[in-house]
Amino acid sequence: MNKFMEMAIEEATFGITNGEGGPFGCVIVKNGEVVGKGHNEVIKKKDPTCHGEITAIRNACAKLKTNDLSGCELYTTGQPCPMCLGAILWSNISKIYYGCSIEDAETIGFRDKEFFESPEKRVSSFVLDREECKKLFDKYQRLSNKKMY
């Protein structure tokens, strides 16, 4: 077994044993060294964004003192959901290794698959006050010290 996936499994096991959330653990590695890890803490923190990947990304960014995780690899017990995949992309992690698929998660009651297939069925979205918000975007664009991610 891969040692980093084994660590991700240990993270997930800790979380489910302590009733903190689902069976999802994650480890982020850079140059062969673990720089972040986490497990699902949705129940513990009463926060639907506390997935293992998000927690591991936050920990890795804090440890490396950056929001750019280029060169990092992510090991996770379950295929990342759309939210986590977005965070992975925004943090510039370019390699993901996962154990169970979205379909595997569906068999134990998780609904990630429906979010990939038809998010528009779950939430309605509308454009509101675009011109005022565009002024804010324009102001940001004029900043000389901005970061784009």
Image (spheres, grey):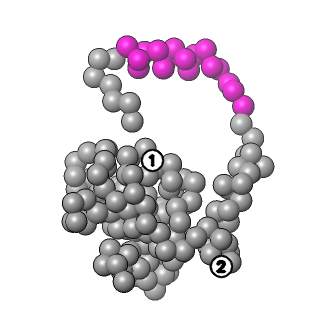
Identified at 47% across, 61% down, the residue is 50
Query: Crowding at label 1, few (<14), some or many (≥20) Cα neighbours within 10 Å?
Result: few
The span picked out in magenta is 126-142
Q: Is residue 67 magenta?
A: no
Identified at 47% across, 69% down, the residue is 98
Q: Is residue 137 magenta?
A: yes
The percent coordinates of residue 12 (x first, y second) are: 44, 77
Question: Can you tell which quarter of the image residue 6 is in?
Answer: bottom left
- Image quadrant holding the N terminus, namely bottom left
Identified at 71% across, 49% down, the residue is 119
Q: Is residue 49 left or right of residue 124?
A: left
**Can residue 110 be seen from the camera position used here?**
no
Q: Which residue corresponds to mark 2?
A: 108
Q: How far, Cα to Cα, is label 2 from label 1?
A: 26 Å
Compared to residue 85, the image places residue 35 above or below, namely below
The percent coordinates of residue 18 (x first, y second) are: 44, 83
The tag on residue 89 is 1
Residue type of the residue flagged with mark 2: Ile
Residue type of the residue flagged with mark 1: Leu
The percent coordinates of residue 124 (x first, y second) are: 75, 41
